[in-house]
Image (cartoon, rainbow, N blue to C red):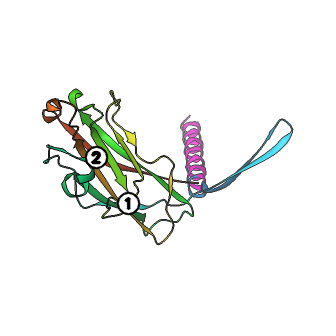
Amino acid sequence: MAKKTKKRNHLVLNAILIFLWLFLVGGLSYAYFSISFEKNKENTKATVIAGKLDVDFETSEYISNKNTWLINDEEIFTKADKTIFTVKRGEQSTVEDVYYNIYIDDLDITDNLKHADVKWRLYNVENPTSETKSVAEGNFENINDITNIQLNQARIYLPKEETHIYTLYMWFSNDENENQLELLNGNLSCRIKLLAITE
């Protein structure tokens, strides 16, 4: 009886070791596999090659909303709150094609600031001027309960050995034809998020 129990334990142990060995081999080689399958009498082959996607995203300033007064749109370069940030490939990145999207994220805004005169504008230079064309711009008028806004229309390609610099402005736009006192009592906080992808 003891001999049968020993034999059964030995078989269970061997089965577990074989399973662990297969799991380890599969885990180590998962990056280099291809799958063939037949669909509608056509052969389709998919190949998956793993690599490391490493992107550095740094910001030097944060929008603090200390300047809550109304300003004219042309004054944003000298009076509006801004944040400057950079995007580049990290040293550990091994993938060939890297793209990214830029978002306003974790947006917390009071209802009175969900207004056409609460604006943002994104530039792809560190020190834009009135002559610089913006990458994107918008306002918070129809934001409702959305907490995440993609700032760029199409994903942005990030070449090797290149650093992209951005400046994002947020401000309360002055309109002489409107009573805008409601804009001076509210709260707006958010952060910039970068989502990197590869093909």
Q: For this view, does 53 lie left or right of residue 34?
A: left
SS of the residue under disc 2 = strand
Q: Looking at the image, which residue is at 35% across and 29% down?
A: 142
Quarter occupied by residue 131: bottom left
Could you say which is closer to the camera, residue 95 or residue 116?
116
The furthest residue to the right: 41
Look at the image and give the residue range highlighted in magenta. Answer: 1-26
Q: Where is residue 126 shown, x and y percent of the image?
A: 32, 64
Using a 10 Å C-alpha cutoff, classify the residue at mark 2 as few (fewer than 14 neighbours), some (14 to 19) or many (20 or more): some
Q: Looking at the image, which residue is at 12% across and 32% down?
A: 185
Q: Which labelled disc corresponds to residue 191?
A: 2
Q: Looking at the image, which residue is at 43% across and 70% down?
A: 91
Q: Quarter holding the N terminus?
A: top right
Q: Which labelled disc corresponds to residue 132?
A: 1
The furthest residue to the front: 177
> Mark 1: which amino acid?
Thr
Nearest to N terminus: mark 1 or mark 2? 1
